[in-house]
Amino acid sequence: MIDSLVTFIVGLAGGNAALAIVVFTLAVRLAILPLSVKQARGAKLKERLAPKLRELQKRHGRNPERLSKELTALYAKEGSSPFAGILPGLAQLPFMWVMFRVATHPTALAGHYLFGAPLGQPIAGVVASYGLLSWPIMVFVLLIVATALVAWWSSRRITVTQDQPAWMRRLLPLLPFTSVLAALWLPLAAGLYLLVSTTWATTERAVLATRPL
């Protein structure tokens, strides 16, 4: 099934697998943009209601049933629900899973290259095939550097608050850099997908954060 999907997507891009990954990733991100907007709207609502949420948790923290009813009533008053910022994010996962499977399918990507670097191989395989000082390795290095820059930008945009646990405040700014670790381990095609997807996601969050939703 994945072989057929990859063949179909690559065929649409005129046989250029790297271009197909970029175009298909952008198409998926564009298709789920309404879900991202809903997720951003839910996050902004939660941020706006944060003082009231803390007050309710302080008042009814020992009575989960009452707390749940009060939270539901508060969100209903705003025309929303406690899951407004969660469900859209979950709905995106199947699309991301399909795209990730396409980008990590070595058999279907065999014989396809990005500027001379094989899309279906991880960096360890490229070193074994071409040597440490080679052009394909430079392609990998440039992609990883670009991914690290996007991760740094994304990390700087993460907001931590004092009401969050200390471990969460330390962990959240580090999460974007998992894409760099993934790019070091996964095939080049997956690294290309991660770069395009995380660049879109970070830019999208920056734009949505400055616009009224």
Image: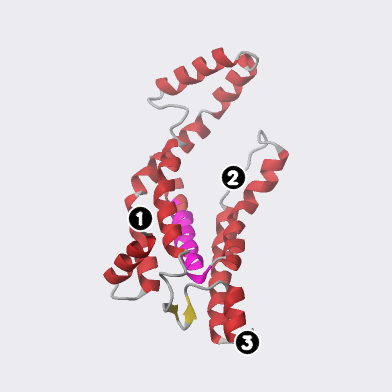
Label 1 crowd bin: few (<14), some (14–19), many (20+), radius 10 Å? some
Snapshot quadrant of residue 102: bottom left
In three-dimensional space, the C-alpha distance between marks 2 and 1, rounded to whole angstroms, equals 27 Å
Residue nearest the observer in this picture, 150 or 130 = 130
Q: Which mark is residue 28?
A: 1
Residue type of the residue flagged with mark 1: Val
Snapshot quadrant of residue 138: bottom right
Q: On screen, 188 above or below 208?
A: below
Mark closer to the chain start, 2 or 1: 1
Q: Residue at x 37, y 64 (%)?
A: 3
Image location of residue 176, percent across then percent down? 58, 55
Mark closer to the chain start, 2 or 3: 3
Q: Is residue 40 visible?
A: no
Q: Is residue 46 visible?
A: yes
Magenta segment, which residues? 187-204
Main secondary structure type of the part rendered in magenta: helix
Q: Which mark is residue 159?
A: 2
**Quarter containing the N terminus:** bottom left
Image location of residue 143, percent across then percent down? 53, 72
Q: Is residue 69 magenta-colored?
A: no
Q: How is the image coloured?
A: secondary structure
Q: Residue at x 59, y 16 (%)?
A: 64
Image location of residue 127, percent across then percent down? 61, 80
In three-dimensional space, the C-alpha distance between marks 1 and 3, rounded to whole angstroms, equals 36 Å
Left or right: residue 50 versus residue 86 is right
Mark 2 or mark 3, whichever is nearer to me: 3
**Quarter containing the C terminus:** top left
Name the element at disc 3.
Answer: loop
Residue marked by disc 3? 133
Q: Residue at x 65, y 14 (%)?
A: 62
